[in-house]
Structures are given as C-alpha cells and as structure tokens.
Amino acid sequence: MLFETKTAFRSQNNRSIALFGMSGVGKTRIASMVREDGWFHYSVDYRIGTRYMGEHIVDNFKREAMKSPLLRELLMSDSIYIGSNITFNNLAPLSTYLGKPGNPEKGGIPFDEYLRRQSEHRAAETAAMLDTNDFIDRAKRVYGYNHFLCDTSGSLCEVVEPNDPDDAVMTALSEKSMILYIREEADHSDELARRFDSDPKPMYYNAGFLQGVWHRYLCEAPVEPDEVDPDAFIRWAYRELLAWRGPRYRKIAERWGYTATMAEIAAVRDEADFLDLTEVVIARRLAQ
C-alpha cells in the first residue's frame, strides 16, 4: 500500500498499518499508545504464542513438571492445571520455550532441538502474519474498530524473502496495510545491544544465519557444543544479527513501504503525532 499524496493514509476512514523492525525500537509502545485512541492492536508475537505455539509451550511446562514426583502424580490424576499466561507485554512463555543452545547445566538445550523449535516458530510466524488481513476484517466486523495496527515480530525479515516481489507474506500484508520500518541508527544499535547484553532473551533466527554463527562461534571460542554458555552465545550472535537484519529490513521498506527512524518514533507522544509522522515518511518517499 503505497500512496500518491502525503495525506492519503491519514485521510482514510479505515486505517491499517504494520510496524516492523528490531525488538526494542518502539513498535509495541506505539501500538499501546494508539490502542487508547480506538485502534485494534494485533500483536504477531501474541498470536504466535497463543494460537500456534500454545500447545508446544504448555507441553514443555508439563515435561518439566513431570520430573517432580509430586507434580507428576497431580498431573496424571488431573488434579492440577498448567497453562501459559502470555500477554502482549509478557512473552516470556514463548521465549522460554524457544530456549538457548548450549550447556544444559546453564539452561541450554541441544542445538538440534533448538533448530527444531526454531522451525516451529518459523511456521507459526508465517501463519500469524498471513492471519493479519483476516484480523483487519474481524476487528471492523466484530468489534467495530476503524483503525488497525499490526505489531510484527522482530523476526519478520527472517520469514519473508525481501528480494522476491511476489513474497506471499509481504504481498498479502501490503494489500491492506501501510508498511512502516522503524530503523535504528548506529548509536541506537549500540543501545539495543547494551539492553540485550544486560538481559539476553531467546529469539528466532533465519536457519542459514543461525547455523553459520553457531559453527563460527564453536570455532572461535573454541568450545564443544554442550560446553557453550547459552547467554554468551546469544549475546555474541545478537550483534551479528543486527548487521544481518539491517539490509533485509531496508529492502522490505524499499519494496513495500516506508521508513521512520527510531528517534522519530521515540518523539511520538500521541495519535496525532503518529499520524503527523506518517505524512513525513510518505512525503520523504515521494521526494526520492
């Protein structure tokens, strides 16, 4: 959805926009802000963790519980219930399930199992993205929302092919939504890396990229797979990931949408500011 005038998005009676970029650039903050002004907030990560990965997550909890004789007895007799309390702002159950590869004594899982869970996530994220247009219609038809914001996962660029103009996910998404990339600058990249370094979280990676950085890490450390410190590995991989994702994000924006900087997003304080920003980014593309 590309526009011929800078006010075209703002003037729509039914606005729909999809935000994408690295985790931490401000997507969910904007989504939460405009939700207060009557926008429907579609969180792709929430959809993944509930609709598509919910059973995997809960089964993992149950496997851990079965290691305890007391909990095993209660589970087997249906005396207790184990569930996932995932929310828009707390995706820990999904992150915990994805896990981190490496030393099991430090909370790691075998790399082959890690790859299997990553594959599950890819399928789930693809399905959740393809659900977006249906949710745009449902938000209007069922709940009466005129405006819609898709808060994509930071790994959107891993499940689409930026160089393919017919990519199924991006073609579907751009049919009904303005696509807006939130770009981190060099200093912001450092800040994102610092945040991640202080609290390294499991995440989804492109399979080819992941296998490459894993083998490189094993050679450079050097260390055996079951001796890898899981947090040390994903901290190291995160900076590699920033460099890997940047060109992919930019290609998506060039082909299907628009770009705002992380600083511009940080300056947004309400819906009016956000709509003003859409005019800025549209005008910027029109001027190119």
Image: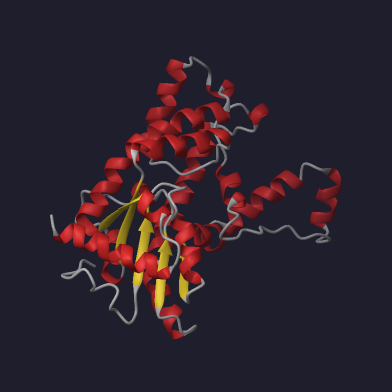
Q: Is residue 2 visible?
A: yes
* Residue 128 x %, y %: 43, 62
Q: Is residue 170 left or right of residue 95?
A: left
Q: How many marks?
A: 0
Task: Check the image and name the residue furthest to the top.
Answer: 222
* Residue 4 x %, y %: 15, 70
Given residues 279 and 35, the one toward you in this image is: 279
> On the rendered image, what quadrant is the N terminus found in?
bottom left
Q: Is residue 173 visible?
A: no
Q: Residue at x 33, y 35 (%)?
A: 243
* Residue 242 x %, y %: 38, 37
Given residues 274 and 240, the one toward you in this image is: 274
Given residues 266 and 52, the one toward you in this image is: 266
Where 258 falls versus 11 (above or below)?
Answer: above
Where 165 falls versus 138 (above or below)?
Answer: above
Q: Residue at x 60, y 32 (%)?
A: 108
* Residue 162 x %, y %: 25, 49
Identify the colour scheme used: secondary structure
The quarter of the picture where residue 220 lies is top left
Q: Residue at x 53, y 60 (%)?
A: 46
The quarter of the picture where residue 279 lies is bottom left
Q: Residue at x 46, y 69 (%)?
A: 34
> On the rendered image, what quadrant is the C terminus found in?
bottom left
Q: Is residue 134 left or right of residue 64?
A: left
